[in-house]
């Protein structure tokens, strides 16, 4: 049990980086999945299963549970695969989506970085450094060093996720691509209208710092 430690799943942290407002809705209204998403998730599961078997045969650690307490947080999750090579921890995160032209999507890189952060404090304590490898079904693999910037993003997001769970409304990280397929689009627009009404708005918006970041992580 997490007790009074705030549980942080790297997959939820990925959602927060993708769009903090979407994380808010998923926490307070529950996840909504259309048929297309259910189908995509089933395909994704098959994709992970097939590649997970290959990873296992190559001697990698596959989908093992990792649980780490840091400060008031309990990070818990199952990295797709990881290994230590020549003293370097390498964490693989698989995505069925399309890769950006270069680097990895920041939300995907942050998820993999969270796993690397957890493993360096638990099962891979002896590693001297860490790299993350985001492997896209469309576009190939992208490998990045686990930088201090990525770890800062993970910890900052984790702290804000706690506030959002308590009810603080966060920043809507809009883009036509994201909002066009978002199941909470109407609720989000209606919330914006309420917040814009006189006396309706929170001044502090967790996640607004994401607007100043490149949505693609390119190196480390
Ligand atoms: S509509 Fe757009 S901004 Fe609002 S929650 Fe969905 S993705 Fe985020």
Image (cartoon, rainbow, N blue to C red):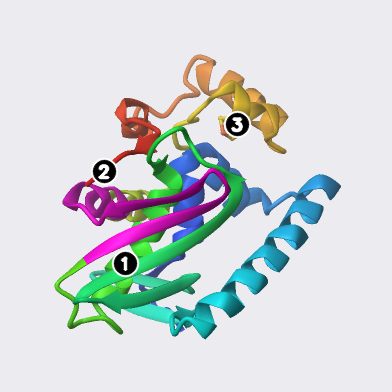
136 to 182, vertically: above or below: below
Left or right, 89 with respect to 41, comes to: left
Q: Residue 219 carries which label?
A: 2
141 to 168, vertically: above or below: below
Return the x and y of residue 125 as percentages of the image width and height.
Answer: 21, 81
Is the shortest distance between ligand 1 and the CB of mark 3 under 8 Å?
yes
Sequence-wise, the earlier of marks 3 and 1 is: 1
Sequence-wise, the earlier of marks 3 and 2 is: 3
Is the shortest distance between ligand 1 and the CB of mark 1 under 8 Å?
no
Front-lying residue, 199 or 135: 135
Identify the image quadrant of residue 186. top right
The answer to whether residue 150 is magenta is yes
Inspect this view and state whether residue 165 appears. no
The residue lying furthest to the front in this view is: 58
For label 1, the SS is helix
The residue singled out by tag 3 in the image is: 178
The answer to whether residue 215 is magenta is no
The residue singled out by tag 1 in the image is: 116
Q: Nearer the viewer, mark 3 or mark 2?
A: 2
Q: Nearer the viewer, mark 1 or mark 2?
A: 2
What residue range appears in magenta?
A: 130-154
Residue found 31% across the figure and 72% down from its top: 118
């Amino acid at each position: 049990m997490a007790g009074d430690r705030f549980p942080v799943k790297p997959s939820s942290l990925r959602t927060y980086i993708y769009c903090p407002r979407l994380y808010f809705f998923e926490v307070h209204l529950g996840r909504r999945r259309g048929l297309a998403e259910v189908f995509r998730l089933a395909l994704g599961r098959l994709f992970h299963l097939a590649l997970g078997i290959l990873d296992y045969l190559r001697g990698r650690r596959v989908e093992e549970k990792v649980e780490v307490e840091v400060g008031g947080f309990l990070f818990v999750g199952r990295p797709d695969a990881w290994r230590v090579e020549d003293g370097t921890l390498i964490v693989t995160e698989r995505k069925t989506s399309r890769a950006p032209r270069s680097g990895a999507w920041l939300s995907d890189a942050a998820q993999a970085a969270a796993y690397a952060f957890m493993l360096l404090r638990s099962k891979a304590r002896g590693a001297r450094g860490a790299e993350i490898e985001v492997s896209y079904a469309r576009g190939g693999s992208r490998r990045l060093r686990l930088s201090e910037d990525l770890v800062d993003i993970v910890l900052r997001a984790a702290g804000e996720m706690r506030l959002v769970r308590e009810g603080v409304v966060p920043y809507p990280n809009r883009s036509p691509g994201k909002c066009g397929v978002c199941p909470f689009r109407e609720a989000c627009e209606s919330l914006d209208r309420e917040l814009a009404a006189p006396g309706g708005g929170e001044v502090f918006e967790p996640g607004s710092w994401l607007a100043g970041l490149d949505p693609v992580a390119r190196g480390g």
